[in-house]
Image (cartoon, rainbow, N blue to C red):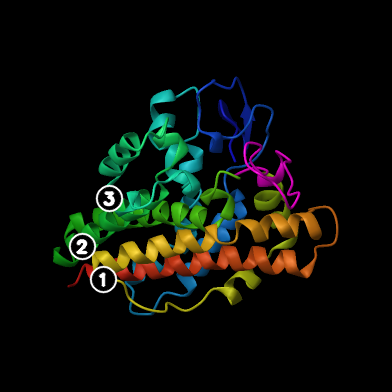
Amino acid sequence: MAAAGAVITGVFWMPSSTPADVSHHAGLAGDVTLPPWGFGAHEMGSRAAVNRLPAVMPEFFRDARHQLAWLNPEPDRWRDRNANEMDQAWTYDHYADLENVPTGAMDAPDRFIFLRLLYEAGVARPERDAGFVYYRILELHERLTTSWRAWRAAEPNDEQRVWLEQRIVQDAGLLGHYVMDASQPHHTTIHFNGWDAETPNPEDYTTDRDFHSRFERFFVDAHIDEVTVHQATRAIPNTIIELDALRRAVRAHIDASHARVAELYRLDRDVGFAPDAPAHPDAVAFTVERIASGSSMLATLWWSAWVASGV
């Protein structure tokens, strides 16, 4: 992930000073890493999602596959501690530390009621300690659906329809970022970068503070290819139109990733995610499944936004 206090230098995120009160998912002083999932996995997942869209999806959207892939890492390009107002606005949208979320809090209809419930439950810094990825996905999906609805209503030769197409691609690309983040188990847990030292560790999982980047960037770049991700990405299983069904699907996506946290750590302990050594098949299979899970969910949400806009 991007280091706290990071500024962009070329394609790398170079650490500067680390403020005392930052999201623990923002990285650690001394890290020199690319953002979550690395750009490679974000882009592979996005292109695989476009490839799974039905042919009746509007052509301009399917033709934007390279732009959608480029946009997928975009929220990580906003990480800049020298632009504090921007950085604080988006820092906590990339994850959900489910261990810190009180039972029932994610039933809140929006992020502000969710935040109020966390404060009422006594969570010290709820925006940092809980995270908003669930709500960020819902927000962008609804915005995408609204833009699709306006696009349908516009006349084919209306200049505003072209502008709406630009808005749709932008929001769809950003939506993809958070859906892919949520498929990475590190983004659903307090054990985001090595096992949390304040909790029991009876299975001797790594506390290595390089684990996050070693798995999601270096291992992926060394051992995972786009063809394999595409083959593992499922066809869209269903169309989600009702809001309650959308909420359940997004929660299920995050919960499924969280359920793999122990497996991720067990694989690291037993077979490793070393980028500079032959990859164990189990480590490759796990990583491909997680990226493809994000890709499958993204295709489902893109398609569902389009369908829901016509209802």
Q: Is residue 288 left or right of residue 43?
A: right
Separation (CA) of disc 3 from disc 2: 30 Å
Q: Is residue 243 above or below residue 42?
A: below
Say what secondary structure mark 2 lies in.
helix
Can you give x and y, in whole percent of width and height, for residue 116 in the image? 28, 37
Residue 36: x and y, percent? 57, 47
> How many labels were placed on the picture?
3
Tell me the kind of residue under disc 2.
Answer: Trp
What residue lies at 32% left-to-right and 76% top-to-bottom? 239
Q: Residues within 10 Å of mark 1 (few under 14, many from 20)?
A: some
Residue at the image position 44 percent from the left and 67 percent from the top: 297
Can see residue 155?
Answer: no
| CA distance separating discs 1 and 2 | 18 Å
In the image: residue 8, left or right of residue 123: right
CA distance for labels 3 and 1: 19 Å
**Comes first in the chain, label 1 or label 2:** 2
Disc 3 to disc 1: CB gap under 8 Å = no
* Amino acid type of the residue tagged 3 in the rendering: Ala
Task: Tell me: residue 247, above or below residue 163.
Answer: below
Q: What residue does disc 2 label?
A: 151
Q: Which image quadrant is residue 154 in?
A: bottom left
Q: Which residue is mark 1?
A: 241
> Mark 3 or mark 2: which comes first in sequence?
3
Tag 3's secondary structure?
loop
- Residue indicated by mark 3: 108
Q: Based on the displayed image, in which of its 4 quarters is residue 27 positioned?
A: top right
Residue bounds of the magenta highlight: 192-212
Tell which tag, 3 or 1, sits nearer the viewer.
3
Quadrant position of the N terminus in the picture: top right
Screen quadrant of the C terminus? bottom left
